[in-house]
Amino acid sequence: MTTTSSTPDPAAGEATATVALTPRQTVQAMSGLMMGLFVAILAGTIVSTALPRIIHDLGASQSSYTWVVTLELLTMTATVPLWGKLADLYNNKLLVQLSLGFFVVGSLVAGFAPNIEVLLGSRVLQGLGGGGLTALVQIVMAAIIPPRELGRYSGIFGAIFASATVGGPLLGGFLVDSPLGWRACFLVGVPFVLAAIILLQRTLKLPTVRREVKIDWWGAVLIMGGVSTLLVWSSFAGNKFDWVSGWSFGLVGAALVVLVAAVLVERRHPEPIIPMDLFRNRTVTLSIIASALVGVSMFGGSVFLAQYFQIAQGYSPTKAGLMSLPLIIGMMVASTIAGGLITKYGRWKIYLIVGSVLLPIGLALFGTIDAQTSKYMLWGFMLVLGVGIGLVMQNLVLAAQNDVPARELGAATSAVSFFRSMGGTIGVSVLGAILANKVTETLNPGGASSGGSAVPNIKDLPEQVRTVVENAYGDATADLFMMSVPFAILALVAVLFIKEKALLTTSGAERRAAEEPDKLDA
């Protein structure tokens, strides 16, 4: 059924009065949002250094190793568009609290999981909550803060996203080595998420759009099915089966058929999960393309650098996390300073351009590393890459939010986030498979290179063998970064074609009240 007005509601009549929050309420509400988002993103990365211990303690197989990470990431990525569309139809405050609730339940189940099957189920719940937060936090920010003022908060959001993504392995290594053990990796965030739920209940005030809706469930199922199939293929190709094989053709073909069906459904449904009209908007389309390409750089940098530090340079998990600090600092400082300057002067494209130029430069610099590269050079390279990511990532979302009607804020925001996550997930899977094959080819010339070899423990290897393994991983990691350069250059091209438009001075909720007064006022 199409959108219609419903029976007048006193609460709806006060919608415009509750749109504007006081500065104190805004800070408190943002604190709750940031707290929940930080913990949710952290859950996806903190487990990486704990996995060997988890798999051993639960008596699981090597194949379970991948799925502990993949299931959470699959669910999060695939459900982002659905959460974004629900945000256009229902009260965002309730949706944020619901996603936080999913995350709490999933974390508790994971923390007390008696076997690997229960743990895998809990990761689905965590991914469902994480997908909601990935989309909803930015949507709520746009609803309560005008784009002109959003730059400052977007910079803080970008810094939190970056620090949680890169800092998770560091915290995970510390907890695993502590008396708390690996279960603390899942439980440590629960008190903070509960605090976020309470804080949002007390401070966040958003109007509810009163209208009858029809959820595009077929579109949601088809989108999630097609995307999940692609992600499963990218995770297994080059490992379980060859890139050019019957399995590859079958999975990619099935994914394309399902996604084409999804597009047909989306074009006809009155409330599509991803409105096809969004892609007629030049700014949104270019932001989506650039975000997907940036995702490869952002996720690839954190994943492969952590492995490089541990294997090629012999650092412990905790020290490897500390080595990544310049990347975190670069992201945080760049996104925070740029956000403040955007709010002050209202100009945003220059930061996108500068960041998009620094991205391929930083990746190319990492394309020159080997096992003997000085840590000071690595720190310098990380600063360049971190500043580039910090200037680009969140400002692409801001550009898209500023150029769509308020009724499509949720869909536009989630689309940019969705394609960034999807680009990063596929990029990491593909590059990881290539790295494994390159290492295998180096260590076993002329042998099979399926990419399925176990990751070695450097400390257990004889000196001569250790040197060979370190060089193999150092050279392979450099090759991967160099392979990422063309993607970053394409992102720069997309950014150059984005047209800068003046930032709006009214919040998303205020704009929606003006666009649809019959659905907000009595």
Image: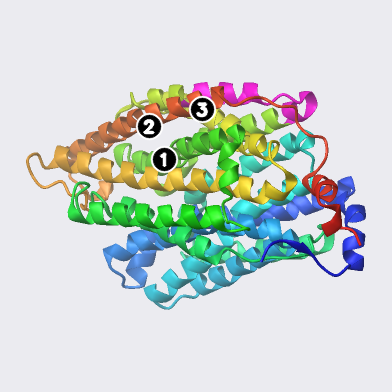
**Of the residues shown, which amino acid type is indicated by label 1?**
Gly
Kindly identify which residue carries mark 3: 494
Q: Secondary structure at mark 2?
A: helix
CB atoms of marks 2 and 1 within 8 Å: yes
> Label 3 is placed on what type of residue?
Ala
Q: Which residue is mark 1?
A: 300
Question: Dot 1: within a 10 Å radius of its alpha carbon, few (fewer than 14), some, or many (20 or more) residues?
Answer: many
Q: Looking at this view, is 453 or 179 the one in front? A: 453
Foreground pick, 222 / 506: 222
Please check the rendered image and state whether residue 154 is part of the magenta-colored stretch, yes or no.
Answer: no
Left or right: residue 377 versus residue 250 is right
In the figure, 421 relative to 489: above or below? below
Q: Is residue 352 magenta?
A: yes
Q: Is residue 496 visible?
A: yes
* Label 2 Cα neighbours within 10 Å, binned few <14 / some 14-19 / many ≥20: many
3 or 1: tag closer to the N-terminus: 1
Q: What is the CA distance from the residue labelled 2 to the residue labelled 3? A: 16 Å
Decide which of 447, 416 is in the foreground and name it: 416
Give the residue number, with chain letter if any, for mark 2: 484
**SS class of the residue under badge 3?**
helix
Which residue lies at the image location 61% right of the left edge and 33% below the top edge?
A: 283
Give percent across and percent down for residue 154: 69, 39
Residue 219: x percent and y percent? 51, 60
Residue located 52% across and 61% down the image: 220
Nearer mark to the viewer, of 3 and 1: 3
| Colour pattern of the rendering | rainbow
Q: Earlier in the sequence, mark 2 or mark 3?
A: 2
Give the residues drawn in magenta, as a range.
340-359
